Image: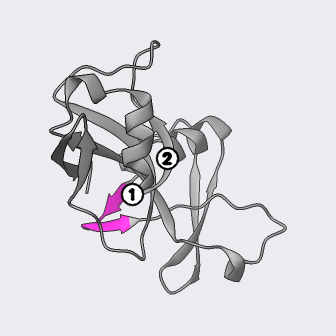
Amino acid sequence: MSQIWRLEGWVRFKDLNEQCFLIEFQSKKDKEKILSGRPWCFDRNLLTLQEVDESMSINAVNFQYEPFWVQCYNVPLAAMNEKIGEKIGKCLGHVIRVDVDSDGSAWGRCLRIRVAVDLHKPLLRGKWLGFENQKLWISFKYERL
């Protein structure tokens, strides 16, 4: 992973138990780069990361949520804004942010939402959205999944 991540400093992996590792970074900048670049995959498997402090027990760490960018298609141009993005995103999980311009609007083929997805629940493929007396099917595509 350290070769894939292209870090400036060193990184250490310590095997804690089955499928659980402690990752130590030399630099805080490298750690923030890796956490902000999630999700990561290794050997076609999702690598879930959780920031911990030394006062925590490894058994108390909860690997339930992982942030994903979700692309929402078929959203009307008038609805491509932060408010509607928050509404759509809440059905997927905890909304981290909606990819919009400084004025709160988004223009493009899709509306992008950064969501902390619950890994223990099935992924939604889409959602019906009521907008101006019409029902629209908004389909979801999870980036890097």
Q: Which residues are magenta?
A: 40-46
Image quarter of the N terminus: bottom left
Q: Which secondary structure class fits the magenta region best?
A: strand
Q: Is residue 18 left or right of residue 106?
A: right
Frontmost residue, 42 versus 91? 91
Relative image position of residue 145 (x, y in whole percent): 25, 57
Q: Residue at x 40, y 57 (%)?
A: 91
Q: Residue at x 38, y 40 (%)?
A: 113
Furthest toward the right, the residue is: 55
Relative image position of residue 94 (x, y in whole percent): 51, 54
Q: Residues within 10 Å of mark 1 (few under 14, many from 20)?
A: many
Vertical position of residue 24 compared to residue 10: above or below: below
Q: Which mark is residue 92?
A: 1
Which image quadrant for residue 78?
Answer: top left
Frontmost residue, 124 versus 78? 78
Amino acid type, callout 2? Val
Residue 44 among those drawn in magenta: yes
> Quick one: SS at disc 1?
loop
Callout 1–callout 2 Cβ contact below 8 Å: yes
Residue 38 appearing in the image: no
Q: Residue at x 43, y 29 (%)?
A: 82
Q: Is residue 116 left or right of residue 32?
A: left
